[in-house]
Image (cartoon, coloured by chain):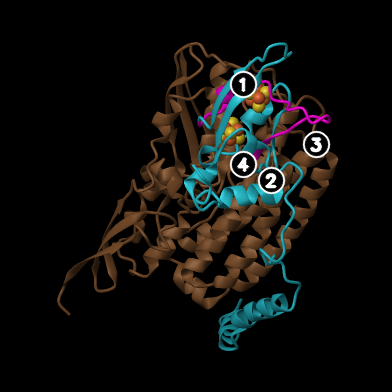
Chain colours: A brown, B cyan
Amino acid sequence: MAFKEINLNMGPQHPSTHGVLRLKLAVDNEVVLSVESIIGYLHRGMEKLWENLTYTQVVPLTDRLDYLASLSNNLGYVLAVEKLAGIEVPRRARYIRVVLAELQRLASHLAWLGFQANDIGAMSVLLYGFEARETILDVFEEYCGARLTIHGIRIGGVPHDLDAALAARIRKVLDGIPRRLADIRALLDDNRIWKQRTVGVGRIAADDAIAYGLTGPCLRACGAAWDMRKDVPYSSYDEFDFDVPLGRNGDVYDRYLVRLEEICQSIRIVRQALDGLPEGETSAKVPRVLKVAPAEVFHTIEAPKGILGFYIRSNGTDKPERVKMKSPSFINLQSVEHMCKGNLFSDVVGILGSLDIVLGEIDK
Amino acid sequence: MSRIGRFLKSFFLVDMLRGLAVTLRLYFSRKVTVQYPEQVQEPAERFRGIVRLYRDDKGEPLCIACKACQRACGTNCFDIEGKKEEGAKVMRPTKFDWKLDRCTFCGFCVEVCPTNAIRFSREFRLTGTDKDGLLFHLPDMYLAGEDLQSYLCAGCRRPR
Ligand code: SF4
Ligand code: SF4
């Protein structure tokens, strides 16, 4: 058949774009020739908005960026402010933060697993993954009263202590997850449809991934070992023993395996943090009106989706002069064209899903 | 694994059967879905629901119109005015407007209140039929339970 280029529009209202993302695809029969992502449908002007709020008031708004891992956003921003203002966080607070952040990673990866499998056509995984995630959200609800937009970290520490009852509950939740994970693995790991839709699909080599700035599990699936928790430890992560799982082929299947293994490693970290929870304060002394002398700072953390960074410039008042966010979803999305080119049209959904993007974070 | 082993495995649909065994087992396991609204799950102790004003044991209002909550709120939910009556010991609010549609349930107002007058209730049903129902005035801040619900939903029927 003669070569014929057809332009197709996917989104902004499409169940598999995970939000309001529009993709302009050029296809030749079934093969994708080019992808152009058009963003901005969820733009709320967050960074500008933050310039009019005090340092403390910004924290609950960071929840609304990556709303599937809101606590990681809190942590990233709060750590940047603490670095800027020179606040020393007590060790117990740092440990509680690690527990919460790793639980958030679990919740985020489980949600991803469900969505990804659902996009490819395995509906039951969505339900099983969400059942496990639900137990984690219940822990958050008990800890600080909210489930999704948690606001569970304050500048200088954490809002509540982690008491023995809650620790016991977290342990129980952690015991339940590997069982659920085994069910999901039995459904997917060897499943021929799953493998045909994922193995060798959306490949990216490690060099290209680094050139595109890909971070997080997508980068580690190509075999490049880079994890901020290990390489530039923050918030006491250097005191825990965990592995950084790596993939080999950089395809959708490896991203799936890497995330599954990260779930197991996160469980390990949470267990260690609960066992070694030191005594002490849960918050440093922070003035109610936090004024920061003129300076600038950039701090990055390993969020579930990749490297999340906050740049803050202060001007001596209680409000930041400028906040700029380096959001992992935005940068990971840029490589979608490279991954989709030459693949089948129907695989665009699977590749996009495997990047684990959240539009709240892309459009800010 | 040998090639024959792999072939046999794929010929006899071992991967599919393993998956089907999982779904079959979970089909007969205990159901986890809560059938809202017939069943309602009790929110946690610290649940951050609608913020409400509280009175002390003697029925006196606790709020002293200090506006600390108004200053702490990042989304400008409050509009408070207070006055000290002749002979009264403390200020009392004469106007206390709170906008549910702006609230992010962050908890700053609850944390800063010096008299513990404003607290989170465990009310999670936040829907109204009209924007007016989402604007709370001073008396409405003390509503709870079904009264609160009829307030939220009756926004359109309330005289303006
Ligand atoms: S919870 Fe937060 S957003 Fe809501 S009224 Fe209180 S301070 Fe404002
Ligand atoms: S609710 Fe509390 S913080 Fe707000 S004005 Fe009344 S006393 Fe002050």
Q: Which of A112 and B29 is in front in this view?
A: B29
Q: Nearer the viewer, residue A10 or A305?
A: A10
- The correct choice, above or below, for A97 with respect to A251 in the image is above
Q: Which residue is tagged 2?
A: A140
Sequence order check: which comes first, mark 4 or mark 3? 4
Is there CB contact under 8 Å for labels 3 and 1? no
Task: Please state which amino acid type lies under the numbered disc 1.
Answer: Ala
Q: State the separation of the CA atoms marked 4 and 1.
A: 23 Å
Residue range highlighted in magenta? B50-75
Q: State the separation of the CA atoms marked 2 and 3.
A: 20 Å
Residue A276 image label = 3
Residue A251 drawn in magenta: no
Task: Please state which amino acid type lies under the numbered disc 2.
Answer: Phe
Residue at mark 2: chain:
A
Asked which quadrant contains residue A361, the reply is top left
Residue at mark 4: chain:
A
**Which residue occupies 36% across, 54% down?**
A21
